[in-house]
Image: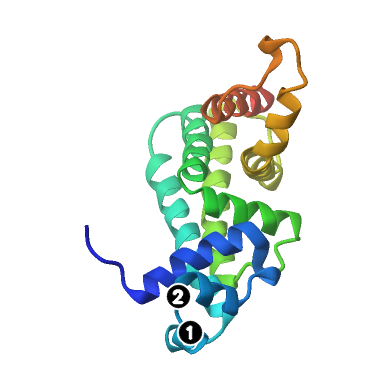
Amino acid sequence: MAKISKKELIVKHARSLFSQHGYELTTLEAVAKVCSITKPAIYYHFEDKAALYRAVICPEFTTIAQHIEENTQVGTAVQRLESYIKTFGEFLISHPDFNAIFAREIANSAITIPDECIEQLSRTIKQLIFILDAGEKEGVFQKETPFLIQMMIVTTLTSYNTARPLRERIAQTIEDKSRQEPNFENIIESLSKKIVKGLLC
């Protein structure tokens, strides 16, 4: 296994801290401490906290945009929308720190998301618009606001994943085990079915 660079180490630990505490409460002092380096060592690689935050989250937004574009090119509009939701969900499962950061940004009006990330997020919205327009042309989708569909997908999946501790505490009080929650993968499928059903003409 290749040894990671100091810059990669900083990004790795900063990602974890940003996911736990958010942008405002994460300090460069805390990042330096967990990396066992000095604060000036961080400044050698990053101009400031904002630059470090960009290095943490912008590549994630770029990757998810690329995955969505790659996975939604073929099939009917319904199949492409299902792939869109599945791709988003599976990315959040495999990137829990990003999921937590994204959820915090949504809850905080996205005031600290860098413009570069917004550009990448816009790529996903454009792809969703393309899919919904195709569904209208195929005569299978009703006209709907793309941002509403996007927020249904993003807020449901990010909130469900980050609320796990609360859900587990509630589940302990429910006597009817059949009413307890399914796993996250099944939530993705369930959400996909509900959104598609709501869009069908």
Task: Point out residue 118 in the picture as x, y percentages from the top left corner.
Answer: 59, 64
Q: Which quarter of the figure has residue 168? A: top right
Q: Which numbered circle lies on residue 38?
A: 1
Instruction: Give SS at disc 2.
Output: loop
Residue type, mark 1 in image = Thr
CA neighbours of label 1 inside 10 A, class few (<14), some (14 to 19), many (20+): few
Residue at 47% in and 83% down: 42
Q: Is residue 60 left or right of residue 170?
A: left
Question: Would you say residue 9 is visible in this rendering?
Answer: yes
Q: Which numbered circle lies on residue 194?
A: none
Contact? badges 2 and 1 (CB < 8 Å): no
Residue at 61% in and 39% down: 161
Q: Is residue 76 left or right of residue 201?
A: left
Residue furthest left as drawn: 1
Q: Quadrant of the N terminus?
A: bottom left
CA neighbours of label 2 inside 10 A, class few (<14), some (14 to 19), many (20+): few
Residue type, mark 2 in image = Ser
Q: Quadrant of the C terminus?
A: top right
Instruction: Give SS at disc 1.
Output: loop
Foreground: 175 or 81? 175
**Where is 174 relative to 27, above or below?**
above
Residue at 45% in and 44% down: 94
Question: Would you say residue 126 is visible in this rendering?
Answer: no
Task: Point out residue 151 in the picture as x, y percentages from the top left corner.
Answer: 68, 45
Q: Label 2, on which residue?
A: 36
Foreground: 195 or 32? 32
